[in-house]
Amino acid sequence: MKFQVVPSPLGNILLAGDGQGLRSLDFELGRRGRVPIPAEWELDESFPLLRRAADQLRAYFQGRRRSFSIPLAPVGTPFQQRVWAALQRIPFGETITYGELARQAGRPRAIRAAGAANGRNPISIVIPCHRVLGKDGSLTGYGGGLAKKRALLELEGARVPGNLRPGLSRVHAGVIARAP
């Protein structure tokens, strides 16, 4: 597995992949601290897949890209795979609820399971788990933290609920600024 760390307006992003596709995209410093890098992974900033992913991420944060065109190879259960496929069908700048996500994954009553699968998404941003909201439209759960989820939704022009305290970071044209 090859990896590299890419700077972004929301902090460093860890990318990892192999000949099959991108396997991991995670905020280097997430809610649980620094993401551990397995000893067998090899730092390779020239690996074509990772270079392409990094270029597309930069374009996304600059407001020049609305979707990604890199091969993905997330590892998960069949249900997780269905949830992750459903996430990829959520249009840029739009949101759905966890209930809708469960319905689109073929198990309308498995709302909590869909939420858990969403939370285990190994390729955040590209597989847009940030586009899922609580049933009342509230921002809930995000591995990178709710401020990052809000920032990603704002970057996409999505309607963002006002349930976070004032003063959290916002993204405007790919640049982080403190809210007034």
Image: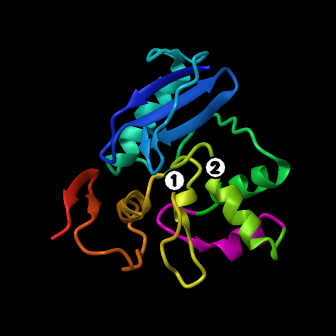
**Disc 1 vs disc 2: Cβ atoms closer than 8 Å?**
yes
Residue 123 image position (x, y, % from top left): 58, 43
Residue 143 - label: 1
Secondary structure beneath dot 2 equals loop
Q: Reading the chain from its start, which is encountered first: label 1 or label 2?
A: 2
- Tell me the quarter of the picture where residue 57 sits: top left
Residue 40 image position (x, y, % from top left): 61, 15
Q: Is residue 32 above or below residue 147?
A: above
Q: Residue furthest front?
A: 32
Q: Which quarter of the image is occupied by the N terminus?
A: top right
Q: Is residue 13 visible?
A: yes
Q: Which quarter of the image is occupied by the C terminus?
A: bottom left
At horizontal 65% and vertical 50% (from top left) the residue drawn is 120
The type of residue carrying mark 2 is Asn
Residue 68 image position (x, y, % from top left): 53, 43
At horizontal 76% and vertical 52% (from top left) the residue drawn is 80
The type of residue carrying mark 1 is Gly
Residue nearer the viewer, 85 or 68: 85
Magenta range is 91-106
